[in-house]
Image (tube, rainbow, N blue to C red):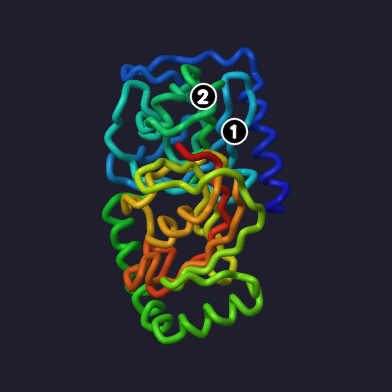
Amino acid sequence: MKIKFIFISILVCTTFFANAQVKYKTAPTGLKYAMFTTNKGEKPKIGDVIKFHFILKTDKDSVIMSSYKSGNPPETRIAKPSYSGDLMDGFMMMAKGDSAIFLVSADSFYGGQQIAPNLKGSMLNIMIKLLEVTPSAEFEEKMKKAQDEQAKVAAANKDKEPELLAKYIKEKAPNAIKTSSGLYYVIEQEGTGPTPQPGQTVYAHYTGTLLNGKEFDSDHGNPFSFKIGQHQVIAGWDEGFALFKKGTKAKLIIPSALAYGAQGAGGVIAGYSPLVFEVELVDIK
């Protein structure tokens, strides 16, 4: 039943995008939009948290990313719009259950990140299905409970981490190389050329998981960039990527001391959690 629902949702969304008769309106903020439903209910305000499905397409109707495909609708906190035509304005026009398409500048949407040449100067089509709206105060209470639970898990993890990490290496990465800091890495495809030097910018694809395989983050196909040795990322990344040549595909197995330590991160990574990243070093500049 769930698979059928998702399939139907994708079909409906695709139909919306393919419909040449869609007529866009322009909001006072400059955002171009087309609403397909107008449900009654509270619309999100700045500070509230929403959960939504989306399909992100180019102006040529090519899919860039879809939460329907991944099965993981994202959550985001409504922030004050930062540019004319910001998608945040669109979120605040919707109520729970509403569907709409928004046209957003690719350059503004990616906020200065490296994007494909064909996207520069173009408009993105973003189909949104608003699933949930959580008031700010309610979300903060929810996060407090989650943090308390994370603290309990962290306390249990503290003594178990060395054993769990050793077990993972033995069973999943027996050929991993260990550095003096405690970082483990496995080169799955060797790149070419020099390794990045401190201060250089690297562009990378990545997927991060816990030792049990649960995914907590991904670049979703859009390379993530950072400067080597500038503490812009966790220590395990600074050290690990400095070992790789352009084009390298590798696995980084990072103990908590080189990741998020006792504090954990994001309500998903508990304290004293080792992390596993499948990475590809796309470019060095």
119 left or right of 230 in image: right
The relative height of residue 3 versus residue 112 in the rendered view (above or below) is below
Image coords of residue 177 (percent x, y)? 56, 70
Label annotation for residue 124: 2
Q: Is residue 132 visible?
A: no
64 left or right of 24 in image: right
State the SS at label 1.
strand
Q: Which residue is mark 1?
A: 64
Image coords of residue 139 (percent x, y)? 33, 56
State the SS at label 2.
strand
Estimate the spatial distance between the alpha carbons at disc 1 and disc 2, rounded to whole Å. Answer: 10 Å
- Kindly indicate whether the residue at mark 2 contacts the one at mark 1 (C-beta within 8 angstroms): yes
200 left or right of 23 in image: left
Image coords of residue 21 (percent x, y)? 61, 13
Q: What residue do we see at 59% from left, 81% from top?
A: 167
In this view, the residue in front, 57 or 207, is: 207
Q: What residue do we see at 49% from left, 35% from top?
A: 98
In this view, the residue in front, 244 or 83, is: 244
Q: What residue do we see at 52% from left, 45% from top?
A: 194
Label annotation for residue 140: none
Image coords of residue 222 (percent x, y)? 53, 38
Q: Amino acid at mark 2?
A: Leu
In this view, the residue in front, 31 or 70, is: 70
- Number of residue marks: 2
Quarter in which the C terminus is drawn: top left
Q: Quadrant of residue 32?
A: top left
Q: What residue do we see at 48% from left, 53% from top?
A: 241
* Disc with the residue nearer the chain's start (1 vs 2): 1
Q: Amino acid at mark 1?
A: Ile
Q: Quadrant of residue 6?
A: top right
